[in-house]
Image: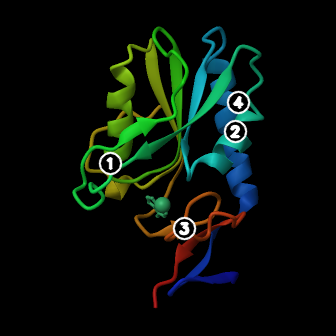
């Protein structure tokens, strides 16, 4: 079994790249059908979603479509207070547009709820959410998810853009923390 040690933890292979790619191909196919004529603006939530966004967006076959890259930033000093983080880097006017938020993972739902709330203040036509991964057992918010790649157990994972304290984003496969 493929294993990798990152910081103090051992991880074992959980989702091979081939499965990730096949999942994203299916998502793209559905979105190509759903989003015709909608001129969607995809919003990649950095850092974790960059690989998913690249893999998905090159399979979006619409001509009228754009992508932009945004990030959630804590104000200085707020790090430990769990306060609402501000969405930064959005330069496009989204009023009246279909926005598709691209997330690597939804677990508690707090982050995506925060993003949806901030975007809605800018009067888009609609905010859709596409997440590669969902941990249903970790959800504490009732969030509307439009496209879900895979549901996974509530175990800590790394790879394919997801990090463990900064490391592991470059792994092409997804690894799950080993129970020792
Ligand atoms: N791994 C890395 N980042 C995450 C996870 C995870 O399991 N859940 C939410 N962010
Ligand atoms: Mg992280």
Residues marked 1 and 3 touching at CB (< 8 Å): no
Gap in Å between the C-alphas at discs 2 and 1? Answer: 31 Å
Among numbered discs 4 and 1, the one appearing first in the sequence? 4
Q: Is residue 125 above or below residue 9?
A: above
Among numbered discs 3 and 2, the one appearing first in the sequence? 2
Among numbered discs 2 and 1, the one appearing first in the sequence? 2
| Residue 155 location, quadrant | bottom left
User: Nearer the viewer's eye, disc 3 or disc 2?
Assistant: 3
What residue sits right under mark 1 in the picture?
75
User: Nearer the viewer's eye, disc 3 or disc 4?
Assistant: 3
Question: Which numbered marker is on residue 56?
Answer: 2
The residue at the point 35 percent across, 49 percent down is 74
Residue 67: % across, % down: 65, 28
Residue farthest bottom in this picture: 180
Residue 125: % across, % down: 45, 11
Residue 46 relative to residue 140: left or right: right
Q: For the N terminus, which image quadrant? A: bottom right
What residue sits right under mark 3 in the picture?
166
User: Nearer the viewer's eye, disc 2 or disc 1?
Assistant: 1
Gap in Å between the C-alphas at discs 2 and 4? Answer: 10 Å
User: Nearer the viewer's eye, disc 2 or disc 4?
Assistant: 2
Residues marked 3 and 2 touching at CB (< 8 Å): no
User: Nearer the viewer's eye, disc 1 or disc 3?
Assistant: 1
Residues marked 4 and 1 touching at CB (< 8 Å): no
| Residue 56 location, quadrant | top right
Gap in Å between the C-alphas at discs 1 and 3? Answer: 19 Å
Residue 73 relative to residue 31: left or right: left
The residue at the point 38 percent across, 35 percent down is 115
Front position in the image: 107 or 90? 90
What residue sits right under mark 4 in the picture?
29
Question: Which numbered marker is on residue 18?
Answer: none
């Amino acid at each position: 079994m493929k294993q990798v040690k990152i910081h103090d933890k051992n991880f074992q292979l959980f989702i091979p790249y081939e499965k990730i790619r096949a999942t994203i191909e299916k998502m793209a196919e559905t979105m190509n059908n759903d989003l015709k004529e909608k001129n969607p603006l995809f919003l990649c939530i950095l850092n974790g979603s960059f690989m998913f966004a690249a893999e998905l967006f090159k399979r979006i076959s619409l001509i009228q479509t754009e992508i932009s890259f945004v990030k959630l930033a804590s104000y200085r000093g707020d790090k430990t207070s769990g306060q609402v983080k501000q969405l930064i880097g959005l330069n496009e006017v989204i009023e009246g547009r279909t926005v598709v938020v691209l997330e690597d993972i939804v677990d508690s739902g707090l982050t995506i709820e925060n993003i949806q709330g901030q975007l809605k203040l800018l009067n888009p036509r609609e905010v859709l959410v596409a997440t590669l991964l969902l941990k249903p057992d970790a959800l504490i918010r009732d969030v509307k998810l439009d496209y879900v790649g895979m549901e996974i157990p509530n175990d800590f994972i790394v790879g394919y853009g997801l990090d463990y304290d900064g490391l592991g984003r470059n792994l092409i496969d997804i690894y799950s923390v080993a129970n020792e």
